[in-house]
């Protein structure tokens, strides 16, 4: 059966992008972010393709369960740590390393240790160096470290922090956060505490932040983490390609409108195409008229509003377009960053939002069995 909308997921590109992380940050260990179902690519697909990463960063205990059930043995770092006793209890059997950002989490870990007298728990601390989302403030860091070190069965591995504005290489705030982080860790220079600051944007633009561990996410999936630009700027390869088909080719008369809200009006008599994808599949509803798609004969602009199951495109430059033709929504020709910009969002959101009814085809670049 021919598919109406599908994504292909290229494991070879994931491996290539991990090699680029190693290229940009050759001294650092890599904690690969595969949270949110591997940024929408599939949790196990990402973990398996990235199996040479030194650790994986995840967001939920459920992700840890799926990874361990899938045979993944790497260290798993739970970025937001545990929020209740049930989550804490799962740490030991799943061998998960929590991040500690609040004192209530320390109490959860202490209780867990009391209930498991022979166990030890590795953990990271989160320092709030200025983003003010999660983490201990610099003023209390020393007291928290002392409290953790007072319990010998808590193995403090390192201190991490996260940047608010690293996607803008010009942002002053990143400098301020680095200074704050360094000042906070000054007393611990002689200790084996490991350091971790850099997300993808900092990996690519701020070598001084690489330290012991880098935490790439979006660049592994082939996207630029910067405000403007695309992954190929950094020799990254797209992992996900999103396709649908032309299901109708229509002729509009001059002045006729198309789609909901009648927002777009034909300037001339013209051919338009209807494509079998919509916001029900994860194509962004806010994609503006002019957002590019690609046919085999080149790019074509979106016209009118995105519907649940369909979009409409301008076929004036594509007189040979036929029903059944494949349309690339993002991938090699149309970088997902361009679609994101046209929809006033970021690539992360689009990659995470592919709908359940979209068929997923995984493979390697070498094997060309992509089409459904
Ligand atoms: C998701 C996440 C990352 C990865 O960020 P990218 O911008 O995708 O590279 C790194 N660190 C933390 C704490 C995260 O939550």
Image: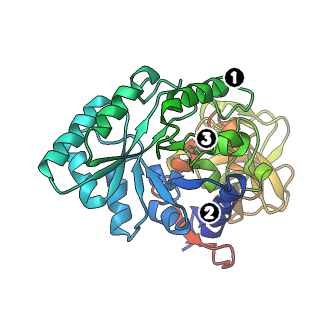
In the rendered structure, find residue 172 and report the number of the disc placed on it.
1
Residue found 25% across the figure and 41% down from its top: 151
Local packing at callout 3 (Cα closer than 10 Å; few below 14, some 14-19, many 20+) is: many
Across and down, in percent, residue 92 comes to: 25, 56
Q: Nearer the viewer, residue 365 or 77?
A: 77
Q: Nearer the viewer, residue 297 or 234?
A: 234
Residue occupied by mark 2: 14
Is residue 345 among the parts visible in the rendering?
yes
In the rendered structure, find residue 306 and report the number of the disc placed on it.
3
Picture quadrant where residue 248 is located: bottom right
Vertical relation: 48 (above or below) 239 = below
Counting residues from the N terminus, which is met first, the one under dot 3 or under dot 1?
A: 1
Counting residues from the N terminus, which is met first, the one under dot 1 or under dot 2?
A: 2
Q: CA distance from mark 1 to mark 2?
A: 32 Å
Residue lying furthest top in this view? 139
Q: Nearer the viewer, residue 96 or 306?
A: 96
């Amino acid at each position: 059966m021919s598919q109406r909308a599908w994504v292909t997921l290229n494991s070879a590109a994931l491996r290539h992008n991990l090699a680029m992380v190693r290229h940009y940050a050759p001294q650092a260990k890599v904690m690969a972010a595969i949270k949110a179902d591997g940024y929408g690519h599939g949790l196990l697909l990402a973990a398996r393709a990235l199996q040479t990463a030194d650790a994986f960063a995840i967001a939920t205990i459920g992700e840890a369960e799926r990874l361990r059930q899938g045979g993944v043995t790497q260290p798993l770092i739970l970025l937001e740590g545990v929020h209740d006793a049930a989550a804490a209890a799962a740490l030991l059997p799943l061998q998960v390393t929590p991040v500690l950002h609040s004192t209530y989490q320390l109490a959860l870990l202490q209780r867990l240790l009391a209930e498991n007298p022979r166990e030890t728990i590795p953990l990271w601390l989160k320092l709030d160096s200025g983003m003010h989302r999660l983490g201990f403030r610099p003023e209390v860091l020393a007291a928290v470290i002392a409290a953790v070190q007072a319990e010998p069965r808590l193995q403090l591995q390192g201190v991490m922090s996260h940047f608010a504005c690293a996607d803008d290489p010009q942002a002053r705030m990143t400098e301020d956060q680095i200074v704050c982080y360094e000042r906070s860790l000054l007393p611990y220079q002689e200790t084996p505490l490991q350091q971790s600051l850099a997300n993808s944007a900092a990996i690519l633009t701020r070598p001084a932040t690489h330290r012991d561990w880098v935490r790439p996410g979006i660049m592994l999936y082939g996207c630029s983490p910067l405000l403007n630009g695309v992954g190929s700027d950094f020799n990254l390869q797209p992992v996900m390609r999103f396709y649908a088909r032309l299901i109708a080719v229509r002729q509009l008369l001059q002045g006729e409108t198309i789609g909901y809200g009648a927002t777009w009006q034909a300037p001339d008599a013209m051919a338009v195409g209807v494509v079998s994808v919509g916001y029900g599949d994860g194509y962004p509803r806010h994609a503006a008229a002019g957002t590019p798609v690609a046919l085999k004969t080149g790019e074509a602009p979106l016209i009118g509003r995105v519907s649940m199951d369909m979009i409409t495109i301008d076929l004036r430059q594509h007189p040979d377009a036929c029903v059944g033709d494949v349309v690339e929504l993002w991938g090699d020709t149309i970088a997902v960053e361009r679609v994101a910009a046209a929809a006033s969002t970021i690539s992360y959101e689009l990659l995470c939002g592919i709908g359940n009814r979209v068929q997923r085809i995984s493979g390697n670049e070498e094997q060309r069995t992509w089409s459904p």
